[in-house]
Image (cartoon, helix red, strand yellow):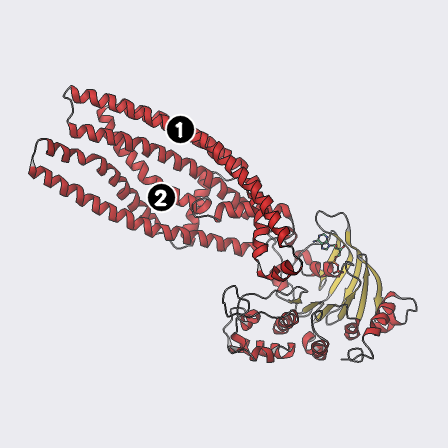
Amino acid sequence: MKTKYSIWEVFKFQIKGILEANKSFIFYIFIIYAFSAGILNVVTVLFPRYIIDAIVVQNINDLFLWIFIYGFSILVLMLLSTISQNIFSGNATAIKFLQARIFFKKYRHVSYRYLEDPTFQAKRSTALWASLGNNDSGYEGTLRSLFRLFPQILTVIGLTILLGLFRPIIVIVALLLSLLQYQFDLRGKKYKFEHRDELNELERKANYFFLTGHDFSFGKDIRINQIQEQFFANHKEKSNIFTSLFKKLNVMGFRFSIPGMFFITITNGLTYFLTANAYMSGEISIGEVSSIIWATLAITLGMQRMFTEIAKIKEDTSYTSEYMAFLENDDYFPKREGIEIELETLAIELVNVSFKYPNSDKFALKNISLKINSGDRLALVGINGSGKTTLVKLLCGFYEPTEGTILINGVDIKTIDLEYYRNKLAVIFQDVLVYAASILENIVGLSKDPIEHEKAMQALKLAGLYEKTKSFPKEEHQELLKVINPSGTDFSGGEKQKLSIARALYKEDTSLIILDEPTASLDAIAEKEIYDNFKTLINNRTALIISHRLASTRFCDNIVLFENGEILEYGTHESLMNKEKGTYRSMFLTQGKYYQKGALQNETI
Ligand code: ADP
């Protein structure tokens, strides 16, 4: 696994990015800009000499001719360079955005365990923000710097020839001093690069408080629990540390640009001295004096800019190298060549499965052995923290067991293609994610197929969200959330849960359905409706149901009771109710008191 890429490898990667974005014409723009801007610099320095000389000898014809040539060439070159610059600018950003989308696509496959890992998050934020988070650094920065670099190279070459013909010593001094300045530039960039992890980490922390403080989904908690003051203070503290480090880095970084100012003065002094001598001895005209002085200034600045761009490219490519290393990290994005097994029906077997979360010493699941036949309904019960959701995460392939094996239709889950397998799962998670799109799109995604549309409407009916959906002026096309569309609406917790149920109903060609507290946010009537439609919801799929409402366990073939990550009791509802001192029985009876002769308890399927 590579952790560092050379400049050339980064260039190759960027060229590939340009081709992938179908923007190969950008190479021509590079060339047009390099020549137009480069020649423009040389013309600006060179031509005034002829105008001045014509003025001195009072040759009106020559004067007008040179003014015309000078004006016309500048006009054409400026037009060309400005147009190419504008074409380039928008496209450079578009190429970066394509790279961001590649990242986005790949990020979907990041091992789930890393999503909760702060070290990974810090690496991600460095890799992403340094390389793709800015228009003039990292990935896009390299493109822009290269774009600016080529005309500088042409300018320097052109003027070096001109000046070299007059006094080579000026060129040699300018080149040596620029090389020296380049060393200082490199040290300056290295200094910045060495501190960027610290800087990013501080910024990430400050941003957390800033962004969360603004995130309207936290709005209620922030107001009611009065945590705004705390957020304010935390943001102030973190951003103060960030700014003081940032200021320090800028001040320290400035040291490295001081020598450059002296170098320009030295080269210019030398040129004035040599040019004045040459003029006084009658070797050159006054027009040439002006050209040479301008050329020296342009060449010193050109070289400095050239080396500054080169140093910047070195810095930017090192950010992109980090980004590439992140993207190619097999640990983060495991390259699993999984197999596709027959999953029309789905049976699960856990053999001595134990699991510890990364960075945790405690077993969240201990030695679990359990069999779920295809089409079976299994209820997972137990108090908070007993390991139910952890088991669901393992079954979704988010984590691999620390010990033991999970068999899906007799095949180790580790060897199955995860994407293919997950397509066969319908999961109703506890924390339902509603995204900024229409109600319909929240179920069918991008599909425009009328059959899928109809299926989604049926699912909304069964989930008890049809009436509500139809009550909006735009019906199922009503946008959710206000982030994208100000006329978007928001759902209540229960409605979100219904939407999640509708998604699971819609995904009917799945073989395993997992319901993690599917009715926790629903009122008693909505809950009853869901249980009434339970058979349709499960639809012969193998089902795993986590619920604190023990009434729901009555619809299941078997019940497993977890305690501290272990199986405490296992059996049918009746068998567990027959255990005189059983925990399940006692939990069921305690809850029963709250659900009087309950609507739900008497339901059967
Ligand atoms: P349940 O779903 O039964 O309420 P969980 O499966 O969520 O319980 O949690 C089981 C145990 O694992 C708990 O002790 C919990 O604190 C711990 N746990 C859950 N998620 C994580 C995590 N991401 N990292 C470390 N420990 C965790």
Q: Secondary structure at mark 1?
A: helix
Q: Residues within 10 Å of mark 1 (few under 14, many from 20)?
A: many
**Which residue type carries mark 2?**
Phe
Q: Position of residue 493 (x, y in %)?
A: 65, 69
Q: Is residue 84 visible?
A: yes
Residue 542, by quadrant, is: bottom right
Residue position marked by numbered label 1 in the rendering: 181
Mark 2 burial class by Cα count in 10 Å: few <14, some 14-19, many 20+: many
Please name whichever residue, 55 or 233, is drawn nearer the observer in this view of the structure: 233
Q: Which residue appears at 81% of the width and 56% of the height?
A: 564
* Image spot of residue 60 (x, y percent): 7, 38
Respond yes or no on whether mark 2 lies under 8 Å from ligand 1: no
The residue at 78%/80% (across/down) is 599
Ligand 1 resides in the quarter of the picture at: bottom right
Q: Secondary structure at mark 2?
A: helix
The Cα–Cα distance between marks 1 and 2, rounded to whole angstroms, is 21 Å
Label 1 or label 2, whichever comes before in sequence order: 2
| Image quarter hosting the N terminus | top right
Q: Quadrant of the C terminus?
A: bottom right
Q: Which residue in the rendered view is the most extreme toward the right?
A: 580
Residue 447 lies, in percent from the top left, at 51, 71
Which residue lies under the disc numbered 2?
147
* Residue ID at (43%, 38%): 312
Question: Is the residue under label 2 in contact with that under label 1 (CB below 8 Å)?
Answer: no
| In the foreground, 124 or 103 | 124
Query: Where's residue 473, x and y in %?
Result: 51, 78
Q: Quadrant of residue 415?
A: bottom right
In the rendered structure, the answer to whether residue 11 lies left or right of residue 540 reads left
Visible in this render: residue 330?
no
| Amino acid under disc 1 | Gln
